Amino acid sequence: MMSSEHIRVDLLSFRIDTPRLTLRPITQSDAGVIQVLADDAEIARNTLQIPHPYPPGEASKWIERAILAASAGKILTLVLTAKPATLADGIPADTALGTLSLGFDWPNSRGELGYWLGTAYHGRGMMTEAVTALVRDSFDRLGLARVFAQVFSGNRASQRVLEKAGFRHEGTLRRHIRKDGAWKDLHVYGCLCDEWRVSKDKKLSV
Ligand SMILES: CC(C)(COP(=O)(O)OP(=O)(O)OC[C@H]1O[C@@H](n2cnc3c(N)ncnc32)[C@H](O)[C@@H]1OP(=O)(O)O)[C@@H](O)C(=O)NCCC(=O)NCCS
């Protein structure tokens, strides 16, 4: 159930600009690039919903579902793109480099965050920049009280992204997922609006 008390923004036109990046709603024009980037064992290994090998046509089907879910106010799916001239080292401007999604539980003012980035673009601080901005807007523009994410044990890069964006490790669900025939523990990370505001104010006052 979505409530107009909570959501004040059309998810199909939701955009975020950061110093180096633009996060914009996914469209069918992103299907070709997403099809290639998502067909990656490293990404599949660390995510729940991305199969490997990535079947032909899967990106287009996923984007169709994402657009429907955004229309219904259930899930926001954004592509991460680089701004022209801000990442001059061979990174294509305005092209999808990865995706972020925020699934809503409106009655509880809660959003579950998920993300992945094409492996060629790892290690440049891009996902930290994107997640930090999306969390800020989850509180400031979407009125959420809590954002959380679930990370497989061993995925230190994702844990670092969340820690740098202001999340706390809240607990570990042991042997919560069976993936590729092996049990995985799942770390839960959460960020509360109140705590986030206090820490932001502290940083501004230093
Ligand atoms: C997780 C992911 C999005 C990170 O994107 P990114 O843009 O490379 O992340 P950033 O550059 O902003 O930050 C990565 C941090 O992890 C650290 N890191 C990267 N690989 C690491 C590793 N193998 N072990 C420990 N730390 C690692 C980096 O050093 C950096 O932390 P630091 O700034 O403290 O040094 C990317 O690795 C990815 O798409 N992985 C596959 C899919 C996935 O894991 N999605 C998340 C599911 S919860």
Image (tube, grey):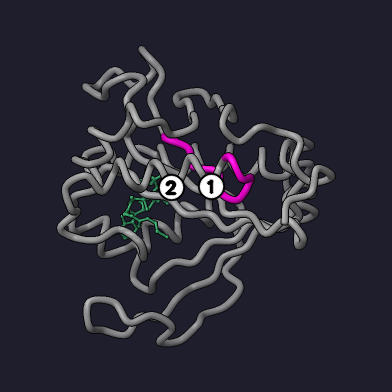
| Residue found at the very far top of the displayed protein | 85
Quadrant in which the N terminus is drawn: bottom right
Where residue 73 appears, x then y in whole percent? 63, 45
Q: Is residue 18 above or below residue 34?
A: above
Question: In which quarter of the view is residue 140 placed?
Answer: top right
Q: Residue at x 22, y 57 (%)?
A: 42
Could you tell whether 143 is left or right of 49 in the image? right
Question: In which quarter of the view is residue 83 placed?
Answer: top left
For label 1, the SS is helix
Residue range highlighted in magenta: 71-79
Q: Amino acid at mark 2?
A: Arg
Q: Amino acid at mark 1?
A: Ala
Where residue 107 appears, x then y in whole percent? 77, 60
Q: Which residue is mark 2?
A: 65
Could you tell whether 126 is left or right of 31 in the image? right
Could you tell whether 166 is left or right of 162 in the image? right
Ligand 1 near label 1 (Cβ, under 8 Å)? no
